[in-house]
Image (cartoon, rainbow, N blue to C red):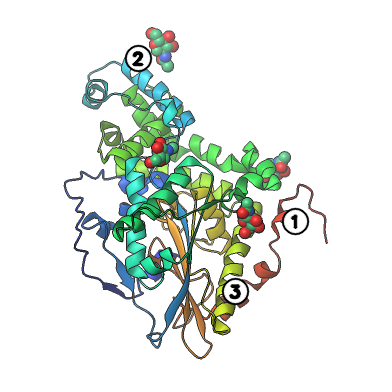
């Protein structure tokens, strides 16, 4: 089921743009910017942000939900825009060196790269958050506070009702700091430090799941479809076309695509690298990357999603706690939970919850048939991607749960009905009963799984 299509049917109400207008006009957007997978900008997923980076589209609550009050919000957020990792940078340097020194000819684009563009990435940049990434998280914090003003509020922050947890990676810690700075700057809070906890058990579960590491992450055979696709007809066509222009080896073409993506995400620059690829080429590059994510973090192998059991239970135990406090007339002690991690944190969890599941697997041979797939990391996982769950008290003991992905309402796959965008919390728990009663990280992740 193409989820994003069904989401569009949910009515929106456009709020008046904020007074602090942050116009990003004048940015020359490459035609292929929609296909950058996990290297894409958040603005390409929500294009209304091009006009005003602080604009929000308030999801209209389903009928008969007007009296519902939000009581808890959990946000699981990917870090903001970052530099390439050292390894990527080495590959890009290699590509650049060859294009600069070994390629010759009259190709105008080749000349443009050779004379107008200089390599400026250095290995020490190693995946660090860039200034754009700081802004990604600051702006997200402001928008979420506009969407849920009673929860993400100055009072709740000062009262200690907002809790922050982050992966220990510097880009995530700095993203967490940026999110907090977005709020403290918004409310002009000075001199108060709001703490965050680091927890890799939760936010980098993939490193700690032994079975995942052995069977998938360190196992070339687990991503065999990716390699087959790279040698298949679609990819060969793109590689030959570009290798011919740049006079470089086929294997380096991917880095030209990444260079285009990074130059755009980091510097808002439509670099000559982008001109190498037309839209059809970009779709092929996008598919190659989606294939990898599918087999490494998504539906390709069951352990990929199961590795996120610890985060799944953490989320539901908090929702249960908030629900319990609410029902017994107490104040909800953790009104907001902000958890900052990676694309590799979000994708297994989204997969566990059943989002973006197509009827057939992504393989090396079904590129054309997958044209309308819902598993599209360019839509799901740009920088600062986020899954937000909001628990509502609708009176008379009725609790409802609203899921948002990248600030857009989504429906839990398989949960349908007139109020599917905000189902009963009880129905959600019933829907995921199997996982709630099982999905034990220790059991799933041990190397030799004994039948029980
Ligand atoms: C590039 O040129 C250098 C020196 O001329 C040569 O040693 C090297 O093998 C060439 N590399 C490629 C990939 O053609
Ligand atoms: C994180 O932010 C701090 C403070 O703004 C800065 O000094 C540091 O260089 C940043 N680290 C990274 C890895 O971006
Ligand atoms: C990290 O989170 C898990 C799951 O909620 C929890 O059991 C563990 O105690 C936390 N670790 C630290 C160091 O806080
Ligand atoms: C590697 O992956 C293949 C394909 O999924 C699987 O059959 C094999 O058992 C895996 N190897 C290890 C060591 O887990």
Q: Nearer the viewer, mark 1 or mark 2?
A: 1
Q: Is 210 placed left or right of 199 in the picture?
A: right
Looking at mark 2, is its residue's CB closer than 8 Å to ligand 1? yes
Mark 2 vs mark 3, CA separation in Å: 62 Å
- Quarter the C terminus occupies: bottom right
* Residue at horizontal 59 percent and vertical 61 percent from the top: 352
Task: Tell me where residue 438 appears, x and y as whole percent.
Answer: 71, 65
Mark 1 vs mark 2, CA separation in Å: 53 Å
* Residue receiving disc 3: 320
Task: Tell me where residue 335 appears, x and y as whole percent.
Answer: 48, 70
Neighbours of disc 3 within 10 Å: few (<14), some (14-19), many (20+) = some
Mark 1 vs mark 3, CA separation in Å: 23 Å
* Residue receiving disc 1: 443
* Residue at horizontal 75 percent and vertical 50 percent from the top: 446
Camera-nearest residue between 374 and 91: 91
Task: Tell me where residue 353 appears, x and y as whole percent.
Answer: 56, 64
Residue 402 got which mark?
Answer: none
* Residue receiving disc 2: 102
Give the mark nearest the N terminus, 1 or 3. 3
Tell me the element at label 1. Answer: helix
Camera-nearest residue between 305 and 244: 305
């Amino acid at each position: 089921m193409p989820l994003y299509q069904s989401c569009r049917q949910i009515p929106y109400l456009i709020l008046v743009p904020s007074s602090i207008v942050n116009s990003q006009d004048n940015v020359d957007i490459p035609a292929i910017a929609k296909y950058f997978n996990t290297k894409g900008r958040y603005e390409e997923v929500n294009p209304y942000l091009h006009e005003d980076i602080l604009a929000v589209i308030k999801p209209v609550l389903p009928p008969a939900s007007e009296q519902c009050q939000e009581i808890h919000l959990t946000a699981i957020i990917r870090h903001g825009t970052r530099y390439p990792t050292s390894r990527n940078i080495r590959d890009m340097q290699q590509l650049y060196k060859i294009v600069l020194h070994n390629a010759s000819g009259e190709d105008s684009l080749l000349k443009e790269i050779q004379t107008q563009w200089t390599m400026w990435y250095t290995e020490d940049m190693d995946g660090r958050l860039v200034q754009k990434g700081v802004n990604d998280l600051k702006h997200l914090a402001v928008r979420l506070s506009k969407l849920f003003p009673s929860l993400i509020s100055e009072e709740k922050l000062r009262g200690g009702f907002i809790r922050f947890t982050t992966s220990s990676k510097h880009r995530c810690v700095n993203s967490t700091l940026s999110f907090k700075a977005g709020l403290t700057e918004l409310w002009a809070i000075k001199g108060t430090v709001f703490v965050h906890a680091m927890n890799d058990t939760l936010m980098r579960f993939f490193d700690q799941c032994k079975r995942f590491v052995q069977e998938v992450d360190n196992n070339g055979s687990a991503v065999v479809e990716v390699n087959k696709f790279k040698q298949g007809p679609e990819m060969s066509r793109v590689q030959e076309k570009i290798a011919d222009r740049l006079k470089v080896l086929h294997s380096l073409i991917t880095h030209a695509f990444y260079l285009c993506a990074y130059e755009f995400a980091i510097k808002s620059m439509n670099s000559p690298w982008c001109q190498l690829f037309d839209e059809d080429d970009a779709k092929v590059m996008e598919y190659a990357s989606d294939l990898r994510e599918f087999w490494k973090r998504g539906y390709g192998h069951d352990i990929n999603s199961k590795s996120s059991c610890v985060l799944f239970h953490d989320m539901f135990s908090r929702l249960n706690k908030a629900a319990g406090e609410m029902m017994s007339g107490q104040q909800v002690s953790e009104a907001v939970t902000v958890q900052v991690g990676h694309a590799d944190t979000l994708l297994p969890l989204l997969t566990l919850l059943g989002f973006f599941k197509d009827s057939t697997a992504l393989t090396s041979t079904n590129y054309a048939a997958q044209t309308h797939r819902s598993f599209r990391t360019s839509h799901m996982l740009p920088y600062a991607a986020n899954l937000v769950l909001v628990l509502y008290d609708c009176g008379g003991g009725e609790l409802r749960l609203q899921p948002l992905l990248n600030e857009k309402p989504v429906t839990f796959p398989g949960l349908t009905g007139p109020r599917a965008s905000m189902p009963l919390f009880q129905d959600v728990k019933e829907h995921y009963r199997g996982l709630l009663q099982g999905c034990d990280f220790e059991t799933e992740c041990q190397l030799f799984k004994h039948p029980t």
